[in-house]
Image: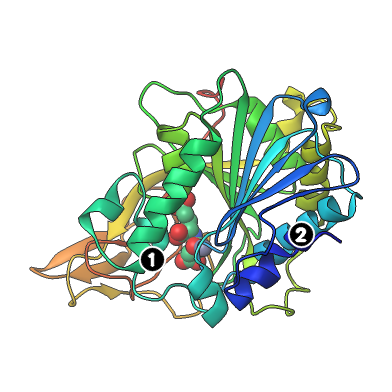
């Protein structure tokens, strides 16, 4: 296998490859761009006009998605997977991946859409570099742009695999992309309704990609991901890469649960208290009237919404950041 197919090994060892560009037997060009960043370009005659950004390891302890990208890269480097799409592979936070931690000083996924400019340290620099790599990759005109930012969650979930679909003023969510996600094994999609500072929101908002955060199961260390079943996603990604994806129809949305954000719960101070059991699962339902959280100056987060559920509850985030998202079921009427 070509040395550049071993991007994960290089990243874990903190090494630069001796050769920065390599050609597979199929004429696919692999180009190392920076730590944890590799571009794959099919021969011009085979290029189908799709630019696909696949990122993982934005949180260093979320290893199942990193292993999935590693397998795809190996297949490409061996010539077993024959891309027709241009692809950018990104391992988001190399130092955190090496240490098996979510982050070192600050969460990279709270530093996009310019937030890194108001901050400092290696993770702010990395967010800036990831924005630059994505912007350069998505700068070619007249091409389709797709970004999947792959994650696993801190806790278990009543709905194991789901996507978060960013929001931008004046842009509508795509039915076709939701059908594609359904075929890739996603059981639910959270339709965002305001701007955000995560990586997928940056590529959706600033780079006009169709972008998603995908949650694939519970975060575990390398080699311990038997419980995370990514087979449907892996099959679909291979089809997208090779341009052999079956056509998507409206029926493709069947069985996909849609949610919208009712409120983001923001932690304002060290007095923040979240009234949930430590082992609560994502998508747990909360009854109207329940006091979800309390914060400084007698602030109380009381459930008002029928059918409310919680995802990503985390009272340990830094002040000013999201400590959970309250979501409610929604319909597909606003999709295009
Ligand atoms: O399990 C958790 O609490 C977090 C899992 C995770 O990392 N989720 C992403 C979601 C990004 C988005 O909102 O699109 C994150 O929190 O960064
Ligand atoms: Zn994550």
Q: Secondary structure at mark 1?
A: loop
- Residue 248: percent from left, percent from top: 77, 26
- Residue 314: percent from left, percent from top: 39, 71
Q: Is residue 293 visible?
A: yes
Residue 98 falls left or right of residue 314 = right
Q: Secondary structure at mark 2?
A: helix
Whole-Å distance between the Cαs marked 2 and 1?
Answer: 28 Å
Instruction: Work out which residue is located at the far front of the displayed protein and give it.
Output: 18
Q: Residue at x 73, y 74 (%)?
A: 225
Going from N to C along the chain, the mark reached first, 2 or 1, is: 2
Q: Is residue 64 visible?
A: no
Q: Nearer the viewer, residue 102 or 48?
A: 48
Can you identify the residue that label 1 sits on?
107
Give the quarter of the figure containing the C terminus. top right
| Count of labels in the image | 2
- Residue 99 shows which numbered tag? none
- The residue at label 1 has a CB less than 8 Å from ligand 1: yes
| Res 6 → quadrant | bottom right
The local crowd at label 1, few if under 14, some if 14 to 19, many if 20 or more residues have their Cα within 10 Å, is: many
Give the quarter of the figure containing the N terminus. bottom right
Q: Nearer the viewer, residue 320 or 46?
A: 46
Q: Quick check: 258 above or below 67?
A: above
The local crowd at label 2, few if under 14, some if 14 to 19, many if 20 or more residues have their Cα within 10 Å, is: many
- Residue 179: percent from left, percent from top: 70, 33
Q: Quick check: 79 above or below 204?
A: below
Can you identify the residue that label 2 sits on?
5
| Res 143 → quadrant | top right
Q: Residue at x 68, y 78 (%)?
A: 222
Residue 292 falls left or right of residue 108 = left
């Amino acid at each position: 296998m070509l040395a550049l197919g071993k991007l994960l090994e290089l990243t874990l060892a903190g090494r630069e490859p001796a050769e920065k560009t390599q050609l597979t037997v199929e004429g696919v060009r692999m180009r190392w761009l920076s730590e944890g960043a590799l571009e794959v370009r099919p021969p011009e005659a085979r290029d189908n006009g799709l630019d696909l950004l696949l990122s993982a390891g934005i949180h260093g302890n979320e290893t199942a998605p990193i292993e999935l990208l590693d397998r795809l890269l190996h297949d490409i480097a061996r010539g077993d997977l024959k891309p027709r799409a241009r692809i950018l592979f990104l391992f988001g936070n190399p130092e955190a991946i090496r240490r098996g931690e979510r982050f070192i000083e600050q969460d990279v996924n709270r530093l996009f859409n310019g937030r890194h400019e108001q901050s400092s340290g290696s993770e702010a620099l990395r967010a800036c570099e990831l924005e630059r790599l994505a912007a350069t990759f998505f700068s070619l005109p007249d091409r389709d742009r797709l970004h999947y930012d792959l994650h696993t969650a801190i806790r278990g979930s009543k709905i194991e695999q789901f996507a978060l679909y960013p929001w931008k003023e004046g842009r509508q969510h795509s039915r076709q992309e939701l059908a594609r996600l359904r075929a890739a094994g996603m059981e639910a999609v959270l339709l965002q309704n305001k701007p955000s500072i995560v990586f997928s929101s940056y590529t959706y908002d600033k780079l006009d990609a169709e972008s998603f955060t995908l949650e694939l199961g519970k975060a575990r260390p390398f080699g311990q991901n038997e419980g995370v079943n990514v087979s449907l996603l892996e099959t679909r990604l291979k089809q997208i890469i090779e341009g052999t994806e079956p056509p998507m129809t409206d029926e493709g949305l069947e069985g996909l649960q849609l949610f919208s954000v009712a409120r983001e719960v923001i932690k304002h101070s060290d007095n923040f208290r979240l009234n949930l059991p430590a082992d609560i699962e994502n998508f747990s339902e909360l009854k109207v009237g329940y006091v979800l959280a309390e914060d400084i100056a007698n602030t109380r987060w009381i459930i008002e919404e029928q059918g409310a559920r919680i995802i990503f509850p985390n009272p340990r985030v830094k002040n000013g950041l999201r400590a959970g998202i309250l979501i409610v079921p929604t319909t597909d009427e606003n999709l295009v």
